[in-house]
Image (cartoon, grey):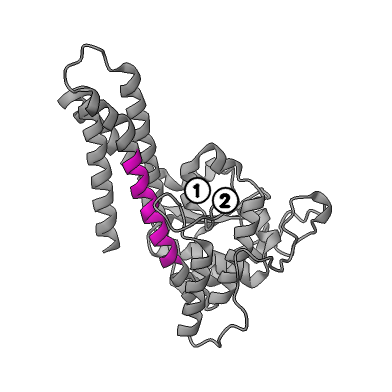
Amino acid sequence: MNSFKTLMLLSAMTALFMGLGYTIGGSGGALIALAVAAGMNLFTFWNADKIVLRMHNAKEVDGRSCPQLVGIVHRLASQAGLPMPKVYLIDSPHPNAFATGRNPEHAAVAATTGLLGLLEREEVAAVMAHELAHVRNRDTLIMTMTATIAGAISMLANFGLFFRGAGDNRGNALAMILAVLVAPFAAMIVQLAISRAREYGADRTGAEICRDPRALARALAKLHQGAARIPNPVALRNPAAASLYIVPGGGGRDSMFSTHPDTANRIAALEQIALEMGGPASLRTISAAAPVRTSVPISAGRAHRRTSALDPLGRRD
């Protein structure tokens, strides 16, 4: 079913791209748009992981350079019945993580040094389980491809706005307005709507993989606060990248314009999952808004940081 939904989504996005091409250049423009869309789909299919990892300047690590993180991912991949993915580290104070790759056999997970310094070991494991859930649910490819096509639609619309001739009679002003404004807006809505649903699914699957839903809930609360306080330069340059992360920069409400569900709603869902798995009722409610105890203070000030047990760079500021 997930593969069918992916195929339908890409077909719809390609049709939208072709419709925009037809508005700008008639039947010839539609054929060119189809060829471009097919080329983008193929290129992104084979290079999704490389595109995203290069964007973040991520460095691959192994059991010698980052033994604890790689060991955690290896154990969780085994529990999830997945091949061992490549593990990457991003030298950034912004606390976040993501997964990428076209399928479980060509997957990669990445975490920032900010995340490793912020979370306890079991919380890091819960975050990695969430990312492996995206791999097992085959979410990673579709989100990267959708973001790529959505960006191309906006690019094509802008091209039409500036280069469509005044004497061109293939369309009218209304069609041009639809091409420039509605098409990219529709692509954005499709991308964001899928992202929210898949985050809930990855939270549940990740909780089942790590067998500790409340560790994931605690991690989400800490990351929600940390991501809001420490900017993410990659997301600032490329807003479409926000859908890749476990938490966005600052969270948000459940709406068609948010890339993720509200963190408080995700935490509440994880509490329910913990009860379903037979865990005792929580003595307190984990809140994404209230201050939470962290292994390292969330403040980005250098005077308050200390070395984390999972920080392979071993820095002490």
Q: Residue at the spot x=21%, y=34% of the render? A: 19
What's the CA distance linking mark 2 and mark 1? Answer: 8 Å
The percent position of residue 246, horizontal first and vertical second, equals 52, 58
Quadrant where the image shows the N terminus = bottom left
Please tell me which of labels 2 and 1 falls first in the chain.
1
Say whether residue 171 is visible. yes
Q: Do callouts 2 and 1 mark residues in contact (Cβ within 8 Å)?
A: yes
Callout 2: few (<14), some (14-19), or many (20+) C-alpha neighbours within 10 Å? many
> With respect to residue 47, does 65 lie above or below?
below
Q: Residues within 10 Å of mark 1 (few under 14, many from 20)?
A: many
Query: Mark 2: which secondary structure?
Result: loop
Give the residue at x 18% y 23%: 171
Amino acid type at image mark 2: Gly
Q: Which residue is mark 1?
A: 242
Residue at 57% across, 76% down: 214
| Residue 218 picture location, percent across and down | 61, 70
Callout 1: SS: helix
> Is most of the magenta stretch helix, strand or loop?
helix
| Start-end of magenta stretch | 185-202
Front residue of 243/224: it is: 224
301 magenta-colored: no
Residue 57 image point, x, y percent: 59, 42
Q: Residue furthest top?
A: 167
Q: Label 2, on which residue? A: 249
Q: Quadrant of residue 103?
A: bottom left
